[in-house]
Each structure stands twice: as C-alpha cells, then as structure tokens.
Image (tube, rainbow, N blue to C red):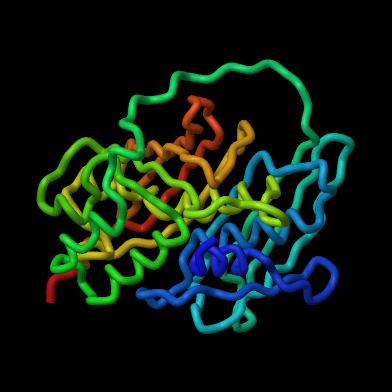
Amino acid sequence: MNETLARLLDLLDLEPIERDIYRGKSQPSVIPRVFGGQVAAQALVAACRTVEADRLPHSLHSYFLRPGDPGAPIVYNVDRIRDGRSFATRRVVAVQHGQPIFHLSASFQTAEEGLSHQEPMPDAPDPETLPTAAEMLPQYEDRFVHPSVSERLLDVRRAIDLRYVAEPPFATVGSPREPRSQVWFRTTGALTGVHDDPVVHLCLATYVSDMTLLDSVLLAHGRGGWTVGDVVGASLDHAMWFHRPFRADEWLLYDTDSPTTQSGRGLARGQIWTRSGELAVSVIQEGVVRVPRSR
C-alpha cells in the first residue's frame, strides 16, 4: 500500500471523542473548502460506528450546508434515530467552528434474500486500455487555473486509480457534447487486514462518487469546471443507494449522465458497476454550476 492510499484510509479512521461523537481530519486542497466526498465518506463512517456489525448502509441522503475549512478538524455528531428488527436509521451533523456544514441521513439493513433484477451494464472499454492520470494530466497543465491543480489531481490519483473512458471536461473546453461521462476506478493498492471491511469499501466508493459526478453537466455545455476557472461549482445535495456487494480495490465503472441544468444548478445521475456486470451503487446529485461574471 502506498503512502497516499494509507493517508486516505487514515482520513476515514475517525477519532472517537465521546459516545456518538467523532472527529475527522481533512486533506490539503487547491480550493478553499473541504472536498465534499471526504465529508460524506467521514459522516458515513461515523454513522456506521453506531450500528451493529451485521447491518450495512443501503442508502444515504445528504446536504452540503456550508463550505468546510480544510485547516480545521470536523466534528461528527450522530443521532440514533431508530433501531428496528431489520432496519436502523442514523442522522449525522458535521460541525466546524460551531456551525453545521453537512447533514446526512443513512439507513441500514440486515442482509436478507429477496427478488432481484437489474438493467444491463453499459458498454465500456477495459480499464487497462485507458491512460493513467500520470499519462493524461500533464498534457493539460497549461489549461489549469492554478499551477498546483495538476499536482493535486495526481496526488489524489496515487490513492485512487481513476481512468477516463473519453476525454474529461477540462480537455474539451468549448466543445459541447453528449452529457455523459464514464470512468473506471479502484484503489491503487489491495485492501487487506483491518481495511478489508465492507464499511471501508462502501465509504471509499462514497468518497470517489463526488469526484467526477458533475462532469456530465459540464460536458453538455463545453465547460471545463473549476480546474480551468470557467465554472463556479459546488455540491448541494448527494444521495446514494447501495444495491450489491463490491470491492473498492477492484475495477468499478462509474457511468454518469445529466438530464437537466437550469437556474445555476445542474443535476447528475450515476451508476457504479462491478467489472463482472453487477449494478452496485446508484447516485444522484444536484450542484451549483455558475458561469463567473465577467469583470
């Protein structure tokens, strides 16, 4: 396991402060706020810590309330809303500087058998045929709004191997195309020992789910996003449904699209598929997507 992946896993290992209260650290950021996927993943970790081990989350619904401060710890307060025979519900509020910055509700279920169906997995090339971040990102460095953007993106990819099926938004600025994006992703090392826990795999997928979800919105308008400075964006809400078991250290296909953009907001939908063709996770998010005002 490389150092960057170890740091990411350490980020998800929250410090218990009191019963149902946890504290988390943040990663350095090139933007003046905490990455939304980090807050969502940490909040889910906090919720999972208060539920019996045989119950895993099957859904979460969350709102981003305020920008998080990357230089300060985040305190996660968990409310045990309900513990039923098969389901449990938790509410988590993330707090910084005395104010809530994020709110999450998660539902948990004891595993059981039932009816099962799914739609077919979309076509995509094998991940091994696609360029790595180290091969792709340097050629676009001159387009990024800040010199450290490429370095930061590469650092994240040392923990998460993320490979675009087609060119990303920052590579096609000014050329609108179909509002759909696909990426393959997995951790850059095997999850073993204490890290080989279903909760860890679920929370890592939650972390990654916020990385490229709004790409499809940007593609529809030929915009490159915050990396090139032609769009001001931020996550507003985020919902996930966990359907089937998966491993975050094995290749997963993240297929996203955008049905609409309006009023400074864009809606994006995503599905995460295992390489064997099982629908593992569904995701929906609405985010702020604003064109900066010209001076």
Left or right, residue 120 beside residue 181: right
Left or right of residue 13: residue 29: left
Q: Which x, y percent locates residue 178?
A: 22, 36
Where does residue 127 sit, x and y in percent of width and height?
A: 35, 39
Q: Nearer the viewer, residue 168 or 229?
A: 168
Provide residue 154's location: percent of width, then percent of height: 34, 64
Frontmost residue, 108 versus 144: 144
Residue at horizontal 55%, vertical 57%?
63
Q: Residue at x 65, y 52 (%)?
A: 192
Residue drawn at 46 percent across, 35 percent down: 271
Res 78 quadrant in image: bottom right
Q: Where the N terminus falls, by quadrant? A: bottom right
User: Which residue sits at x=34%, y=33%?
Assistant: 126
Question: Please, is residue 128 above or below residue 124 in the view?
Answer: below
Residue 140 in the image, given as x and y percentages of width and height? 17, 61
Asked where in the image residue 226 lies, by quadrant, the reply is bottom left
Q: Is residue 90 left or right of residue 9?
A: right
Q: Quadrant of the C terminus?
A: bottom left
- Looking at the image, residue 237 lies above or below residue 10: above
Q: Residue 267's quadrant in the figure? A: top left
How many marks the image carries: the answer is 0
Camera-side residue of 62 and 295 = 62
**In this view, 128 is above or below 23:** above
